[in-house]
Amino acid sequence: MPKVGVEPIRKAALVNATITEVGRAGSLDVTVSQIAKRAGMSSALAHHYFGDKESLFLAAMRHILTLYGAEVRGALVMAHGPKERLQAIVRASFTAANFRGEVVSAWLNFYVMAQTVPEARRLLGIYQRRLRSNLLSDLRPLVGRNALRAADSLGAIIDGVYLRQALGQSQPDRAAAVALVLDALDAELARGMA
Amino acid sequence: MPKVGVEPIRKAALVNATITEVGRAGSLDVTVSQIAKRAGMSSALAHHYFGDKESLFLAAMRHILTLYGAEVRGALVMAHGPKERLQAIVRASFTAANFRGEVVSAWLNFYVMAQTVPEARRLLGIYQRRLRSNLLSDLRPLVGRNALRAADSLGAIIDGVYLRQALGQSQPDRAAAVALVLDALDAELARGMA
DNA sequence: AAGTTAATTGACTCGTCAATCAACAAAAAC
DNA sequence: GTTTTTGTTGATTGACGAGTCAATTAACTT
């Protein structure tokens, strides 16, 4: 039953199905057929819209990054002043959405991909630069010339805490993650104002 | 020309070849034949010794973790007092060996594996607990009741900095990595002694 | 010397899967 | 109302790769 103007719907369905299936499998060892089936279509159609498997994964990752970016921006508009903004960024990095198994899985596989697939590396670079620049612009008014080091440090803690929570033996504890990073932020601020 | 007592040599060769090939490919999408060929034998022999591909990868990762553990222990014997010991742990985490492309690749793929393969998760747990306990035992004499939080924080920074350096757009800068973490360590100590 | 064990491989099986293609269906355009 | 565009799939191709197996060779034992 071919209808017109379905392309965006189909693409979105495929992207979601990709995220789900990659999460299910925990790896990129997922067949295009599985994904297509979950999205309610044939594998041929998936190829029709995305060309190949890799592009499909990249589209899925782009989607995840877009959502994350939106969460950060959303949290930022509610924040008053640089310190609140920094806290908002931290909180946005540890929302429930970001800890869903599928998202964790996507990130880990994305890291692997970034080693060899230029487009993945490019996307990762964008994420890293955006986080850095966000942190930097709110750290500068608070800690001046220490901002650069503080941004690197906070960025690393955010990534590190995420990784450890995601791969910890027990269920991720978002509150603990946020507390740890906010605490590090406070320490950084206390230090930088001296 | 079958000789006796070759098993350990062959196994070691396979483990090394696995690390090399996984590094080359950047992923676990490496055929057993490729690995076996690099190790100078037939794929059948690889299966003979390790059973299946997964066990081979796990053996390779176990090897990497063993080397890392040895580096840490080696650095620790040279250190006097808790602070020097902490610095030694940090330095050992960012040696050139740990930043070789193959090792980075192994770690990233190991993370992915840890999501679904119980033995990988177990190994990762061992690494995490060892790091934590190492940090904790030297932090306690220095910062007392703050040791727990400090250990979590430092552990996260170590992992985070490693990840970022490994996946950064430019070549990893080991000195910068060490400096950043040592700096965080100093901050943690200054704070904890208050 | 005969038998056991370790080492070793080529060839094969069996399954899988990405990607392509020919063909068909329906809507839109003319 | 025919042509074009868009959507859609079943079937197929072509390649690849994990794991098995039977058979071979050499060393070690008794």
Image: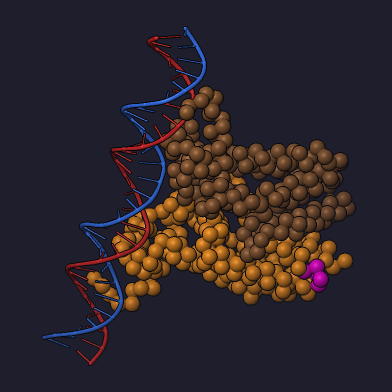
Chain colours: A brown, B orange, C blue, D red
Position of residue D5 in the picture relative to residue B156 (left or right): left
Q: What count of labels does the image hold?
A: 0
User: Which residue is painted at 76% across and 64% down in the image?
Assistant: B150
Near-viewer residue (A4 or D29): A4
Position of residue D28 in the picture relative to residue A77 (left or right): left
User: Which residue is painted at 24% across and 71% down in the image?
Assistant: B1
> How far across and down, in percent of the image, does residue D3 sit?
39, 12
User: Which residue is painted at 52% across and 55% down in the image?
Assistant: B109
Membership of A74 in magenta stretch = no
> How far across and down, in percent of the image, does residue A43 sit?
44, 39
Occupied quadrant, residue A73:
top right
- Magenta-tinted stretch: B143-147
Q: Is residue B2 above or below residue B52?
A: below
Q: Is residue B81 above or below residue B185?
A: below
Near-viewer residue (A78 or C22): C22
> How far across and down, in percent of the image, does residue A44 sit?
42, 35
Q: Main secondary structure of the magenta part?
A: helix
Q: Is residue C4 above or below residue A41?
A: below
Q: Is residue A149 visible?
A: no
Near-viewer residue (B4 or C13): C13
Q: Is residue A15 visible?
A: yes
> How far across and down, in percent of the image, does residue A112 sit?
53, 50
User: Which residue is painted at 83% across and 41% down in the image?
Assistant: A79
